[in-house]
Image (cartoon, rainbow, N blue to C red):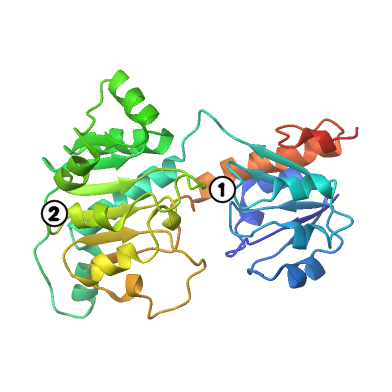
Amino acid sequence: MKVHILDDWLDTLRSLPCYAKLAQHDVTVWTDHEPDPIALAARVQEAEALVLFRERTQIGADLLGRLPQLKLISQRSVYPHIDVPACTANDVLLCSNMHSDTPSYAAAEMTLALILASYRQIPQQVASIRAGQWQMGVGRTLRGRILGLYGYGRIARAVAIYAKAIGLNVQFWGSEDGRARAQADGETVAASRADFFASSDIVSLHVRLKPSTRGLITADDLVAMHPRSLLVNTSRSGLIDPGALEAEIAKGRIHAAVDVFDDEPLRDTAHPLLTHPNVLPTPHIGYVTEDEFDLQFSDIFDQINAYSAGAPIHMINPEVHHF
């Protein structure tokens, strides 16, 4: 098959063991991002299969209608960036392994790394010693502080294990179902939403972005956080009400560590989340490790080979399967 891989920005996949699974296919790797569907369609006009890097490219009817050769989209995990009815209308099969029992340990590790780096001022201290100025400030110890995890999914539970290992006290909040599962598992659940934000020294978001969770974290939630508390977001920026975090950060009262942004890749160096000293920003690298990529794309490439062999797996819209 003619396989086109989108958005492999650092040209990583060709160096991973899983890439050998595509040996029997004609593969094109695109290492930049093309957001315009018309321009993108011109690039991948001959593609029979598209491979996606998570949610880096939106797949809609305007793109799919311009790709008459396309038969398969292969990716992993949730697919809010894909118009599934448009795939079906254009006779394109979407395959996506939902990996129901496997959290992204890379994302959980990144969450802990951001917390540690923020509390110990690691980026600022590195900059200081490189500038010949030795120490620039005094950090804070995590042991004994309260980490509030919003959400009770696979990544949040992995973060909780790491956090407890270094002496953080962990409490949860989230949907009614999530809180019930946390309590059933013997975890601490805050007395109320207001208490969760007011009592947590650190709040970390671990919720999937979907219509019902967009804007879930409000300006009032952020106002309720106590001075010098830290908000961590390695999930999706859309979980926070537009502009609410920027407005609260501008007051200089709370801190934030963010790995996700409304517009990605973010190139605006004047963006307040990049310029404010209370914010530690990283360029959506939560799941970006060689190990995680090899795990994810091994599944993705298996889906291509299964389709090519006439026995597709992990079908999201099986009604277009004509074998």
Measured as percent of width and height from the top left, residue 72 is found at 79, 46
Q: Earlier in the sequence, mark 1 or mark 2?
A: 2
- Judge depth for marks 1 and 2 and give the one in front: 2
Q: As drawn, is 139 to the left or to the right of 87? A: left
Residues 78 and 44: in front is 78
Q: As drawn, is 113 to the left or to the right of 41? A: left
Measured as percent of width and height from the top left, residue 172 is found at 27, 35
Decide: is 152 above or below 255: above
Measured as percent of width and height from the top left, residue 240 is found at 38, 56
Decide: is 163 above or below 217: above
Q: Which quadrant of the figure has residue 270?
A: bottom left
| Residue 93 tag number | none
Q: Residue furthest left?
A: 138
Q: Which residue is mark 1?
A: 293
User: Under tag 2, what secondary structure?
Assistant: loop
Q: Which quadrant of the figure has residue 77?
A: top right
Q: Which quadrant of the figure has residue 123?
A: bottom left
Q: Are marks 1 and 2 in contact (CB under 8 Å)?
A: no
Q: Which residue is mark 2?
A: 226
